[in-house]
Image (cartoon, rainbow, N blue to C red):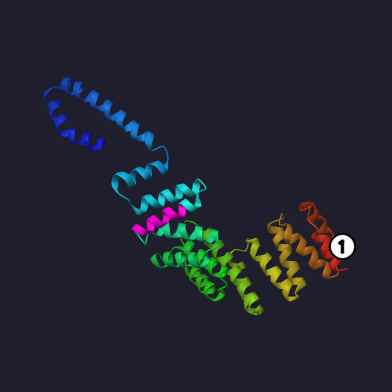
Amino acid sequence: PHLGLALALVPALGGLWGKSPRALIAVTAPLLALLALLSSLYIQQWRDSKTLFSYINKVEGESAYAYSQLGGAAILEGDRAGAYSLYGKALSLNPDYKEALLARARLEMESGAYEKAALGFQRVSSLDNGDFYALYELGLALIRLGNGKEAFFAAQKLDRLTLKSGPVAELARMKADLWGKVAVETAKAGDSEGAAVLFGHAISLAPDYAENYYLRGVSKDQSGDLEGAAEDYQKVLELSPGDYMARFNLGAALYRLGEREGAARHFLEFKKMQPASDMVENFLRDNP
């Protein structure tokens, strides 16, 4: 309001300048000082995003944007319940407000409300079919729900999205991660050949993503392909030497293959990483 008052005075002050510059200075100096004081008082109220957007809601009327921003501020303060409520208020004003839909769905994923989260990510995806974050997180929610078939379709849609600039590597990593998880679900369903194809595709999308080699190694391990599993665990350690589970699993695979010296070396490395763990002792007891 003070800025509006200042702008309203501009024409009158302009006319005064033409008649008497000294009079203009005498009039404007205290006005500018008052304006500076009032602005300073309001700026003190807007000491952070929470107070700023609360003030906007109060003065300009409630808005989905302001409530969504307040939700983000609540998350930064660790108040997830408060944030969830604020995102709900944003969506009550605008049910298609994408930022609030996405943020609320993520909170639902955190709390284990996977069905609600999937609906939220699906809504965002329908509003913006180029939002790869929503498609990726939809796939994750569907996997948590045990719906591997729908997760497969989400991964297919994500695969079709391309970027010429921006987070190109991030998108590739998301595609690889989701396909790797879909491959795990495919293997659980008993389709080992299909899982092998999907793991291969996932790895081709992001060859330096260690997680997919680990998941494929576990899948091979469970199907009895110990040599293939050992190769994948070895690749994990090349990409991520500190992965202690890959270290343990490689030792276990080598042990069962009869390569006791190699197994012992990896078991010792594992014990250095996890000195309090009794996994090695339990494995050797169960596999004399």
User: Considering depth in this image, is 207 or 144 the residue closer to the camera?
Assistant: 144
Residue 5, by quadrant, is top left
The spot of residue 18 in percent (x, y) is 12, 26
For disc 1, the neighbor class at 10 Å (few under 14, some 14 to 19, many from 20) is few
Which span of residues is magenta-colored? 83-93
Q: Position of residue 110 (x, y in %)?
A: 54, 58
In which quadrant of the rendered image does the C terminus lie? bottom right
Instruction: Identify which residue is drawn at 47% across, 48% down.
Output: 74
Residue at (50, 47) in percent of width and height = 76
**Residue at the spot 71% in from the left edge and 57% down from the top edge:** 243
In the figure, is residue 231 to the left or right of 12?
Answer: right
Question: In the rendered structure, does residue 204 fall within the stretch colored magenta?
Answer: no
47 and 21: which one is in front? 47
Q: Quadrant of residue 242?
A: bottom right
Q: Is residue 53 above or below residue 245?
A: above
Closer to the camera in the image, 282 or 262: 282
Taking 223 as reference, is 68 above or below it?
A: above
User: Magenta region, mostly helix, strand or loop?
Assistant: helix
Place of residue 134 in the rendered image (x, y in percent of width and height, measured from the top left): 47, 63
In the picture as drawn, the residue positioned furthest to the left comes out as 19
Who is closer to the viewer here, 192 or 70? 70
Q: Label 1: which residue?
A: 261
Secondary structure at numbered mark 1: helix
What amino acid is found at the position of numbered circle 1 in the picture?
Glu
Q: Is residue 33 left or right of residue 175?
A: left
**In the image, residue 92 lies in the stretch drawn in magenta:** yes
Residue sitting at 39 percent across and 51 percent down?
A: 67
User: Image check: 8 left or right of 105?
Assistant: left
Residue 21 higher or lower than 110, as above or below: above
Where does the image place residue 221, in percent across and percent down from the top left?
74, 71
Observer able to see residue 135: no
